[in-house]
Image (cartoon, rainbow, N blue to C red):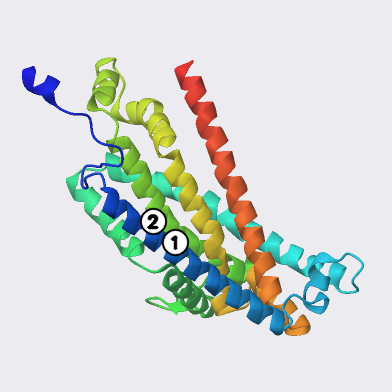
């Protein structure tokens, strides 16, 4: 007890890894901070000056985007709105399928035995290690092969054409590619959420006579979803942003692809990309706030 009472409280600014800076260290920190701030402001000033000299702030560049009386305003926003709608459709489909399949894979991995778990883990590690754009490209190539037909033993041919689905084949190439990648990420998030719960939760459920599946479905998964909600929402935001990757393959005209078509006609890439970036930031910010609202609501219901 004596040793504990003689311990001094940590100094202001001290952390586990670093001691509190002294007067000289604080002066150096302040000096380098001022130098860095001046350098950043200088770079921003030079960039703005260069943009002014090249006419990037002119009415001809911004008018079609911000002035409703401009002759191109309605046409430009109709095109951007159409591209944004296509982006939302792809994102909603990919998010819904990723959640359903990801939860199913996560539950299968938790419930499976040591031997049956191996192929599930291999599947998760395979798609988790792939870049998203490569997953979309592989789905595109497989879709082409299955459209032509894969020969099977005998005279049989395995054929499936994604173009028969609503929205066209390129929409489903994007959706399936995003789902293949993000479902395994969500599966790992769900598994981490269940594993992070105290073991007593499952033991108490089994002691009450519930089966392992009932314990998982009624006790563990609801708590895991609440714990992992921020991580889940962050991954859903990633899905929305990754829809723009289909622009690399072309074909499906989502928001980014549509913005390129607008740029080809108006020759204002900086202005259009600024507007597209603002749209993505606004949607992701709204999604994040919605997640915080859901988290607070669930926490209030649980504590009440």
Q: At 52% from the left edge and 53% from the top edge, which residue is drawn?
A: 237
Is residue 93 found left or right of 19 in the rendered image?
right
Q: Secondary structure at mark 1?
A: helix
> Vertical placement of 241 versus 257: above or below?
above
Residue 61: quarter of image: bottom right
> Vertical placement of 243 versus 145: above or below?
above
Q: Secondary structure at mark 2?
A: helix
Q: Position of residue 9 (x, y in %)?
A: 22, 29
Residue identifier under label 2:
30
Q: Nearer the viewer, residue 109 or 298?
A: 298
Instruction: Mark 1 and mark 2 in contact? Answer it, CB < 8 Å.
Output: yes
> Vertical placement of 257 versus 78: above or below?
below
Residue 191: quarter of image: top left
| Residue 204 seen in render | yes
Q: At 38% from the left edge and 34% from the top edge, which residue is drawn?
A: 224
The numbered mark at residue 34 is 1
> Vertical placement of 198 versus 118: above or below?
above
Residue 80: quarter of image: bottom right
Which quarter shows the N terminus?
A: top left
Q: Residues within 10 Å of mark 2 (few under 14, many from 20)?
A: few
Q: Residues within 10 Å of mark 1 (few under 14, many from 20)?
A: few
Is residue 81 found left or right of 279 in the rendered image?
right
Q: Position of residue 55 (x, y in %)?
A: 74, 82
Q: Position of residue 202 (x, y in %)?
A: 27, 25
Q: At 43% from the left edge and 69% from the top edge, which residue is drawn?
A: 135
Q: At 51% from the left edge and 22% from the top edge, which residue is drawn?
A: 300
């Amino acid at each position: 007890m004596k040793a504990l009472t003689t311990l001094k409280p940590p100094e202001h600014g001290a952390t586990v890894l670093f001691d509190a800076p002294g007067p000289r260290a604080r002066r150096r920190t302040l000096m380098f901070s001022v130098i860095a701030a001046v350098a950043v402001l200088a770079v921003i000033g030079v960039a703005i000056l260069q943009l002014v000299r090249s006419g990037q702030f002119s009415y001809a560049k911004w008018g079609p985007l911000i002035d409703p009386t401009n002759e191109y305003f309605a046409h430009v926003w109709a095109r951007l709105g159409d591209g944004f709608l296509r982006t939302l459709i792809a994102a909603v489909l990919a998010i819904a399928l990723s959640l359903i399949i990801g939860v199913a894979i996560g539950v299968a991995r938790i419930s499976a035995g040591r031997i049956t778990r191996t192929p599930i883990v291999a599947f998760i590690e395979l798609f988790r290690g792939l870049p998203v754009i490569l997953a979309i490209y592989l789905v595109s190539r497989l879709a082409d092969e299955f459209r032509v037909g894969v020969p099977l033993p005998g005279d049989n041919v395995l054929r499936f054409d994604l173009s028969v689905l609503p929205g066209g084949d390129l929409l489903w190439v994007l959706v399936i590619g995003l789902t293949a990648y993000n479902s395994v990420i969500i599966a790992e998030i769900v598994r981490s959420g269940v594993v992070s719960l105290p073991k007593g939760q499952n033991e108490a459920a089994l002691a009450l006579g519930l089966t392992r599946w009932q314990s998982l479905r009624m006790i563990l998964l609801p708590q895991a979803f609440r714990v992992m909600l921020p991580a889940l929402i962050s991954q859903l935001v990633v899905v929305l942003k990754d829809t723009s990757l289909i622009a690399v393959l072309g074909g499906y005209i989502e928001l980014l692809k549509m913005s390129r078509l607008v740029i080809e006609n108006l020759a204002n890439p900086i202005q259009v990309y600024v507007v597209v970036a603002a749209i993505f930031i606004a949607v992701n910010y709204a999604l994040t706030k919605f997640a915080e609202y859901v988290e607070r609501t669930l926490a209030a219901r649980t504590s009440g």
